[in-house]
Amino acid sequence: MGSGLCDCCLCCECAANVKLAFVGAGQKLMVFLRNLLHGTTSFDNAEDPLGLQLNTLDENVIQLCNDQNLPTLRRLAASENSMVQQTAADFFLHLSNHLKSTLPDPFLRPVVTLLYSSDLKVQETASLSLVNFLLKDTICIDTVVQMKILEPLIELFKSGDVVAQSNSCACIIMLSSSESNANTIIHDGIIPLLALAKSYDPQVQQDAAWALLQLSQSEASIKLLCRCGALPVLVLLLQSSNSQLQFLSCAALCNIASVLELQPALLNACGHYLIRSLTNLMSSTVTKTAAKACKCLQLLSNCEHFQVQLMELDWFLPLKTLLRTSSLIYIEPALTLLCTLSAHAPNKDVLVDEGFLELIGQLCHGQNSCPSIVMQSSVIISNLINSNFGPEAVKDTVCVFGLLKVLENQTLTDEALIQVNSCLLQLIDIDSLRSHVVAQVGSEHVTRLVNLSGQRRNPLLSYTCAAILSKLEQTGEGLEKLPLLTRLV
């Protein structure tokens, strides 16, 4: 289920946010740590180890990941002295920033111990090191889960510490790539995660929304989320003034709406607020959010009752804005929504009156090499032509010109050409439109139709081309084109 946001981008951005609190933390180790590892300093020393003047590590950090050093790191992590624990946490943070090979599994155990520390600063540093390890793929996700790191991470949701909460959310995002992990996270951590999504801190709220989006990637996880009460929270987040939060919650709801059997529950739980929030987001200055809202509306528009409510709201202008953009990422969801709405009879006259035929004709003309746009545009024209005002409206638009322009394209797919031909046949069959269509058919179009009708790779394409040629031959207004047609045949 696509969110419009890839896992790599999601994790990188989240990790970048949580790292801001730790700039320069990697330079807190070496003199003290070397002495500890070589037994020349006691880890229970009452002096503040972090107050010592430390140098950065020059040699390869992997030299510190050996069995001889492991017992000392374990003792550091398990110390009751929070300053000593912090030294161990700083070690792992520095290691996570510089290690390029896989961290040996036994070295992960002290990190788990540090996550259970009673000192929030230690938890912050340890959780950030885990973010780095996961982001750089220097630890195995299965190993992390086997060591039950999910438990302290979920506990950090309840810590009340903004940095620790953000770090734990970043870890959850990466760990939830596995469906079994996602289910465990939902079962054990969804309540505190939903509480974080309602936090007063914008960064924590955003990180929680990221995690909820990541947890909505499979149907099984989506059903669990819905049963645990995620729907009202996500709809509430749509109304945030934070554009990133709007996008994340909208993307998660889009994933939920893609599960057909959950649509009634989604609409029953928060239909009124959901429709208004999504239509408002279609006017967002962040185009990716507007496009995602449009996609969500389209998925929910399979319900006729939802369509009735939608048609009562003011969403036409933002939809037109999306259709006028130059990017397929934004045009396609807008077209898909229009396809769905134009197929429903009560909507047709309204859509024609709003000028969508003219806009679709222009789009067809300008984007005539894109199969998806061509096919959806042809479907919309075919749907709207059956309205009360459709035939007359077509005469005042560039719909026919746009369709014929598509026909000239030598690289278009057979499927798209078949859809265009079907639409042209429908237009020619309408008495009041026949002369309008035939008048715009030129010799180049006849030549193209004849050539395509003779190809053998796709019988349906040949048939639709031959059918149009037959209509032209039977039409009195097209008699002037018959000599050319006869020569070509």
Image: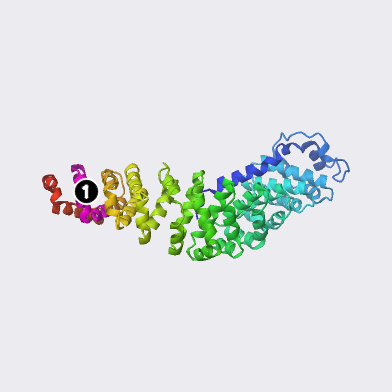
Residue 95 versus residue 236: which sits nearer the camera? 236
Residue name at image x 49 percent, y 62 percent: 259
Which of the 4 image quadrants contains residue 458? bottom left
The magenta stretch is 421-450
Say few, some or many: other residues with alpha carbon within 10 Å of mark 1 (under 14 / 14 to 19 / 20 or more): some
* Residue 374 placement, left or right of 201: left
Q: Is residue 124 visible?
A: yes
Q: Position of residue 464 (x, y in %)?
A: 23, 55
Q: Main secondary structure of the magenta part?
A: helix
Q: Which residue is mark 1?
A: 436
Task: Please state the total of marks drawn on the protein image.
Answer: 1
Q: Secondary structure at mark 1?
A: helix
Give amino acid for label 1: His
Q: Is residue 70 visible?
A: no
Position of residue 467 relative to residue 57, above or below, is below
Q: How is the image coloured?
A: rainbow
Position of residue 295 relative to residue 38, above or below, is below
Q: Is residue 110 magenta?
A: no
* Residue 95 placement, left or right of 330: right
Q: Position of residue 115 (x, y in %)?
A: 74, 52
* Residue 26 placement, left or right of 35: left
Q: Position of residue 47 (x, y in %)?
A: 87, 41
Q: Position of residue 273 (x, y in %)?
A: 54, 58
Q: Is residue 447 magenta?
A: yes
